[in-house]
Image (spheres, grey):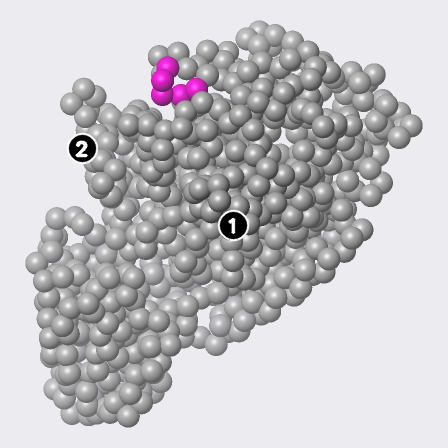
Amino acid sequence: MQPLHSQISHCCRPRATHGPSFAGAGMARSRVIWPIPTHRRAVVLAAHSRRRKQQPSSNILHQANPAAVEEPHRLLLQTFLDAPSNQLKLSFQLVSATVTVAGGDGRGVRGEEAIELDVKLAWREALGAPGAVVVKNHSDFPVYLKVLKCSAAAGIRVAVDFACNGWVYPVGKHPFRLFFTNDAYVKENTPRPLLGYREDELADLARPVLGGSREYPYPRRTKTGRPPTRADPHTETRVPLDQQIYVPCDERVGTAVIAAPSLPNLGGHFKSIAEIYSLVGLDDVGRLAKAKQIINSHAAAPKFPVPQVISVNPMSWRRDEEFDRQMLAGTNPVCIKRVTKFALTGELDRTAYGVQDSKITEDHIQKNMSGMTLQQALEDGRLFVVDHHDWVMPYLKRINELPGEEIGEISPRKAYAARTLLFLNNDSTLRPDDILSVNMFTAWDLAKAHATANDTSKNNFVFHWLNVHATMEPHVIATNRQLSVLHPVHKLLKPHFWNTLHVNAVARQIVFGSGDRRKNGDIFRGIQEVTYLPSKYAMEMSSKAYSNWNFTELALPADLIKRGLAKGDPNNPEKLELLIKDYPFAVDGLEIWIAIKKWVADYCSIYYVNDGAVTSDSELQAWWREVRHVGHGDLQDAHWWPAMDCLADLVEACTTIIWLGSAFHAAVGLGQYGYQGFVPNSPTLTSRAMPEAGAVVTEAAFLGSITPRNETLALMGMAAKSLARTGEVFLAQRPESELWTSKQSPAEALARFQESLEVVAGKIQMRNADPTLKNRAGPVEVPYNMLTPTREPGPVARGIPNSITN
């Protein structure tokens, strides 16, 4: 069932008397004063594109004719269209930031409106500097406006930039759109002539919130606009795959990476590892197949790139050391925690689930603790666990009864609620539990497969989807609803929300949707339910996990301390002591976290000189109220919510949001193909019961117990698409054409942030080259680059995107 949800609509609403529904728009109509042209006229340079893919690059923007730009009598319009430029008809009208309409409601005076492509904008010096510009589109197609540049003329002592980055629709659909300059103001410091426009902008974006009330009791996300079904008025109708789900137009940037793979119906399970190698162009022993061999065998060209985990040492993925290392440096390095008491036990209701004590005894582990007693190991912080018991157990019986009515749509499941106990060696590696025979598969291989299927499923539905994608969406909505585009926090966070709503909408349509999963053998909807262990219970299980969600514990220092992986003060991350010294995710992540927090603190201190400035910022307080009481309304009464009454709360909250949308997402989401692209290394489901301990398992029997062929191809196809990260903007980067600030101090703070990340990148490179740090690359010899800030070409998981874009 797809519930109706709360909404944010930047556009695409019926025409209103006070203007269009756009971010940066929504200006009430007021009496216009047409000033008499008595001085030199302002020059505005506009750069725009009809389509997103044809937005002018920053290089083109700066290649405008210098002589033309200096001409004080012309409005110069630089166009990049796939249609003749004479079809474009835009009008511009400047709004004063210093002079109000006489006898009016306090809004700034508007200047002369000009509609030609080459125009003369009249502007009297007495009107001071413009603070906004009204843009009308008299064409019959929408235009994407990147930037407007207003030169120093007619009383404007310095050049003024309008960072638009938004769509302007024809006047028949939306009368106009208003863009502010790239200055930032908290509401109380906004120039009085712009205050009314600022308030109109937010009022025009507001919609009734669905969720958090008896009348509208639904989770909060962007409204889709889909009509209800005939059978159930509370359930939304589906969107056909050839149609796009609604996303506010400014949030739809490019094409979402997620796509429904069109793959053949191969059916059944793989029979050999060589068959899987062939998908990526490797021969039966994992070497790159020569072109001559492929031609002679009439084999098809490789369908997918070689996953990193088999790119250097194709057989090392089977080693226990590598299995353990991936808990510190794989795609789910955030689940391992310290064991403080033994025996292990669950925290579920014993009346419902009975005794939950682990069957692992002291006798089982004593031989692998280097002569150390159990009590010594507990006290010294040498025992760790990856425990999925409480997440899986409530659904274990239902999962194991699949496919049930879905027979023919999903494969059978056989699950266990897995716990993996680990011992920390002196060299910071984790002790394997047994010695692996390289000549055959064993019951131990299947035990690792069952544990990994638990792990990949929880990472996908809890750490990746829930903790990043789903819980970020209320922040995106609240930011657009409550913070003006003039607000400094809006400018700080906006780059980290880029395309997130679009990706989430596509994910709900294709990835998480239930129902028609296969058609003519092709997996095209509900991919996650088909390919992951929990199947149709996955989203319900993520909901149960959300009941224990805590925003403050998503901050990296707090997370490490909670899991027992670090000691110290979470507010002083530089001095945290890691229990596992060679913990790549934690070591690299803390350096990234410290750099982000320093940047956020430097930026916020420019606009908030003390705690009182935070509490008196009405927009900021409204933003946080919506995040807590509406966006996360089901948890609004939790005691852990920050009060947002001091600068420290603001810095910590913004740092956490940026961390989640950038570095954390890169760590748990963007390296999936490198490890899960080779399914034997990271099975996503298991379908057969464990054999007796010590039993020999054939290769075919092992492969017949994990992810089948069709599901494997769907996973590989979806994960491989995330490697093509075209048009990505990475952490600390802003496109030159964005013109995000007019002040020197924020720009200098950003430059310091960029420099600090370059230092971090250098340290990561040095650690990856250090042979004493065995967890950095492991037996498979894949360096840990998930949190390397710099981006290099190629299909390697490297670089931290600014936002959640896949």
Residue 561 visible, this orientation: no
Position of residue 782 measured from the top left corner of the image (x, y, whole percent) = 65, 48
Say which quarter of the image contains residue 87.
bottom left
Q: Position of residue 543 (x, y in %)?
A: 45, 27
**Residue at the location (52% across, 58% down)?**
794
Label number found at residue 227? 2
Q: Are marks 1 and 2 in contact (CB under 8 Å)?
A: no
Inter-mark Cα distance, 1 to 2 = 56 Å
| Percent x, y of residue 754 | 56, 67
Q: Is residue 299 left or right of residue 779?
A: left
Disc 1 residue crowd, few under 14, some 14–19, many 20+, Cα 10 Å: few
Residue 341: x and y, percent? 76, 23
Under mark 1, the amino acid is Lys
Judged from this view, the residue extending furthest toward the right is 371
Q: Quadrant of the N terminus?
A: top left
Q: Which residue is mark 1?
A: 292
Q: Main secondary structure of the magenta part?
A: loop
Q: Is residue 244 above or below residue 69?
A: above
Circle 2: element type = loop
Helix, strand or loop for disc 1: helix
In-image side of 450 versus 192 (left or right): right
Taking the spot 85% from the left edge, 22% from the top edge, the residue there is 366
Left or right: 253 as drawn, with respect to 758: left
Q: Is residue 649 above or below residue 154?
A: above
Measuring 20% from the left and 83% from the top, which residue is drawn there?
75
Q: Going 75% across and 27% down the picture, which residue do you hit?
A: 437
Front position in the image: 96 or 144: 144
Q: Amino acid at mark 2?
A: Pro
User: Which residue is farthest front?
Assistant: 296
Closest to the observer, 606 or 41: 41
Residue 508, disc: none
User: What segment carries the magenta color?
Assistant: 407-411
